[in-house]
Amino acid sequence: MTAPMFHYPAAQLARFSDPETSLESAAGDRTTHRRLVLEAFAERGASGLDYISAAKRAGLERHEAERRISDLRNLGYLEVLLDRDGHPVRVQLPSGRSGRVHVITHAGRAALSGGAA
């Protein structure tokens, strides 16, 4: 059984004026990208990933991974990694800016294995 994170109404993923094939493609891409990103986090484990590292591991463009990380965090499948003081763990990105590190949750692992989350 496919986890709920992989079901999205096509109308939310493309413009209403787009042909039906575009709607189908949009739904498929988002589903596939979410799974690829979540699998990258599952492989990395407790040390987590920033969005650039997740993009590389998932074989996606940075902006695609960043959007899917946001989606997965909103679904409760990823969370921001916190340090001992409860502050978000941040790493320096190639741009010189800092980025938050995320980790997969138990619900995220359950979604990957096909369990209800």
Image: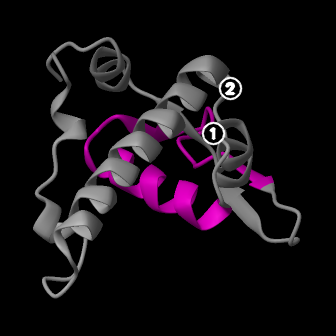
Of residues 113 and 46, which is closer to you in this image?
Answer: 113
Q: Residues within 10 Å of mark 2 (few under 14, many from 20)?
A: few
Of residues 85 and 80, which is closer to you in this image?
Answer: 80
Residue drawn at x 54%, y 61% is: 64
Q: Position of residue 76 (x, y in %)?
A: 28, 39
Q: Is residue 68 left or right of residue 117?
A: right
Spatial CA distance of label 2 from label 1 is 17 Å
Residue 17 in the magenta stretch? The answer is no
Q: Position of residue 51 (x, y in %)?
A: 64, 52
Q: Which of label 2 and label 1 is nearer to you?
A: 1
Q: Is residue 115 left or right of residue 53?
A: left
Q: How many marks?
A: 2
Residue drawn at x 63%, y 32% is: 48
Q: Secondary structure at mark 1?
A: helix
For the C terminus, the image quarter is top left
Which of marks 1 and 2 precedes in the sequence?
Answer: 2
Residue type at mark 1 is Ala
Of residues 13 and 76, which is closer to you in this image?
Answer: 13
Can you say whether 112 is above or below 65 in the image? Answer: above
Q: Which span of residues is magenta-colored?
A: 62-91
Q: Which mark is residue 58?
A: 1
Residue type at mark 2 is Ser
Q: Secondary structure at mark 2?
A: helix
Residue drawn at x 20%, y 76% is: 19
For mark 2, what is the residue? 47
Q: Position of residue 89 (x, y in %)?
A: 66, 45
Kindly check if marks 2 and 1 are in contact, taking CB atoms under 8 A apart as contact.
no
Residue 73 in the magenta stretch? The answer is yes
